Image: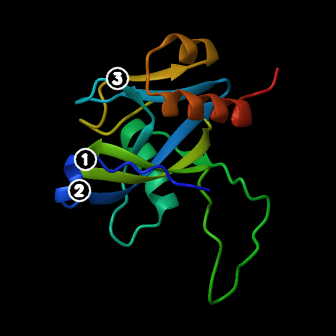
Amino acid sequence: METKNLQSPISKFMEITRHFTATTFVVYQNQVLLHQHKKLGIWLPAGGHIDRDELPEEAAVREVKEETGLDVTLYNPDSQLFIADDEACQLHRPMHLLLENINPYHQHIDFIYYATAVSNQLNPANGETHCLKWFDLTDLENTEMPTNVQVCAQEALALLGQKD
């Protein structure tokens, strides 16, 4: 499979900085949680940079807790562990792994996870987010947001939403 070159023409002459991030689409019943990004003004799922020595799946859960106050269970697309012994263990595989252009000189390598919450009661840490909203399928279709956010949110609802 060919990877699309996301390098901008300007960046040919300057080094691109890449950071690892973890993003989580949280589902409760038939809704997915998004927040309006403070600087960009667009709807995004909970997420952020992976700290040094932190596993991507740990960052995914931590970022959700900080930004929403929710405790979540990550969806595991692998039905069973294949490797688990003293030398190695299988990590939680993300649903998607995206290379995202933040600006011409900065990219995120983003581990995309899906998760379920046991409650829809939000309690974000001070200053983390200013606008959180639960979206159903109709809301997702009728709200302007990046295509990758809409597609992943719809997929998360299809996989984890309650069936009527």
On residue 9, the disc is 1
Mark 1 vs 3: CB contact within 8 A: no
For marks 1 and 3, give the CA distance.
Answer: 35 Å
Q: Compared with residue 90, is residue 69 higher up or lower down, i.e. above or below?
A: above
Q: Quadrant of residue 41?
A: top left
Residue assigned mark 2? 12
Quadrant location of the N terminus in the rendered image: bottom right
Tell me, yes or no, if residue 127 can be seen here: yes
Q: Amino acid at mark 2?
A: Lys
Q: Going by the image, does 76 lie left or right of 136?
A: right
| Image location of residue 140, percent across then percent down | 55, 18
Q: Quadrant of residue 104?
A: top left
Name the secondary structure under disc 1.
loop
User: Counting other residues with Cα less than 10 Å from the Cα at mark 3, is it few (<14), some (14-19), or many (20 or more)?
Assistant: few
For marks 3 and 2, give the CA distance.
Answer: 37 Å
Residue assigned mark 3? 131
Q: Going by the image, does 71 lie left or right of 90?
A: left
Viewer-proximal residue among 39 and 54: 39
Residue found 41% across the figure and 45% down from its top: 47
Q: Quadrant of residue 52?
A: bottom left
| Image location of residue 98, percent across then percent down | 48, 49
Name the secondary structure under disc 3.
loop
Label 1 vs 3, first from the N-terminus: 1
Front disc: 1 or 3: 1
Tell me, yes or no, if residue 120 can be seen here: no
Q: Going by the image, does 94 lie left or right of 149?
A: right
| Image location of residue 151, percent across then percent down | 58, 30
| Image location of residue 85, percent across then percent down | 69, 85
Mark 2 vs 1: CB contact within 8 A: yes
